[in-house]
Image: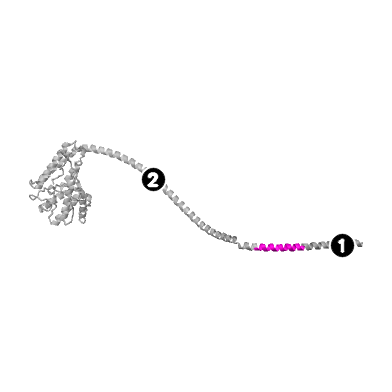
Amino acid sequence: MSAIGLGGPIKRSTGGSAATVAEPCARPDVDAVGHSEQIYNLVSLIKCHDASLLECGGVEGLTRHIFCHPWGDGSPQVKLYQSWVIHILRLLGKKVEISRSDDPLAVAEIIVDALQGLDLDGAEVSAAHMRQGYGYVACKVLHELLKKLITARGIRLTAYELCNKEGCGFGGACEEDVEDFAATQIGGGGAELSSDHDNEEDDDVSAVGELGKRDGRHDASAASGNSPVTVKDQWTEEVEQMLKFKKAFDQHLPQLSRSFKHLQAELQEMLTRVEAKEEWIGRQFSRIITEHKEICQELENQVERQQMLRGRLEDLQSKREATQEAYDQTSKLLQDKYDHATDTRPLQELAKTLATMKAEIKQMELRIGVLQHTSIRAAIWQAHFLVLFEWAACVRL
């Protein structure tokens, strides 16, 4: 893998033509620079001690800030970072099994599982960081793994001193590199360049690309050991490179400022719309709350009415039971009376009694006729005797 430094551009072909366009790298993570510098120093120390220990690919392309910022689409960087972490974990005795068909996310999850139980100085590791391949957490994890590897191999470590053996291939930078690098990046007004303005600033981008090429050639030459570079010469060259970067960045500041103002106006307009939307949502929410309270009150009223109706229902059920009992008693009484009314024996006895009474009445009528006849005869005889008596009396006179 070719050396990719801080300013090294990634070449991208456009539309299949032979021409290439230099993409400016994204702004490095300043928090990761310290760990990245120490990674560079530790790798140089390990290479001087045992050059075959880190034969995992890409060692000759290592730069001081290789994992501080993304490279283009990031796929080569992610593969390089994950291969380094997996190789070091295996050197530390961890069993990490991966296959060629595993995608970077699956490999990241495997790495996170393998890192369990290791003291990483409080670093919160997740699959997203291992999938990203750059940044503070990624650099810190690799830094801590290299420290553990040096401890496990018994390599002497004196304040991360750089190896100056002939043929080592790594020039060094002191601790002040981190502070100067961070100050250069922050003082330059930011390293993010809008892709919409690349065509307007072709000259500046070409200059940045040329500097990146020079840095890449310098790192590759230093890694191969063909051109030994002293710490002072390398540091001076990097300072000049950073100053040129700062100049290029300063040239983009006016355009960035205008873009930021335009963005601020758009954000303000968007914020106004959001506030209006929030007010509308607030009104809708207040209306919904009012309706909810009304519905709750209506629900309470319905519950009270239900309880009242339930009490009435229980009362009606009690009355129904009492009515049912009275109905049963009345039905039984009426049935008894009906049975008694439909009984023919009393009628038969009454008919017999009436027949007997008729016979007796006939006999009594007969007797009465006889008595009347006798009484008439007696009256007639009496009247006859009386007439005779009166005639006799008259005769006597």
Residue 253 percent location from the top left of the image: 20, 38
Residue for point 17% across, 36% down: 202
Residue 368 position (above or below residue 275): below
Q: Which mark is residue 388?
A: 1
Q: Tell me residue 308's x, y (percent).
A: 47, 53
**Does residue 353 show up magenta in the picture?**
yes
Q: Nearer the viewer, residue 193 or 366?
A: 366
Magenta part of the chain: 352-371
As shown in the figure, which amino acid type bears the numbered disc 2? Ile
From the viewer's perspective, tell me whether residue 330 is left or right of residue 279: right
Considering the numbered disc 1 on the image, is that residue within a helix, a strand or a loop?
Answer: helix
Q: Residues within 10 Å of mark 2 (few under 14, many from 20)?
A: few
Taking the magenta stretch, the answer to whether it contains residue 192 is no
Farthest right residue in view:
397
Per the image, the residue denoted by label 2 is 288
| Residue 353 position within the rendered picture, expressed as x and y whole percent measured from the top left | 66, 63
Residue count near mark 1 (Cα–Cα under 10 Å), binned few <14, some 14–19, many ≥20: few
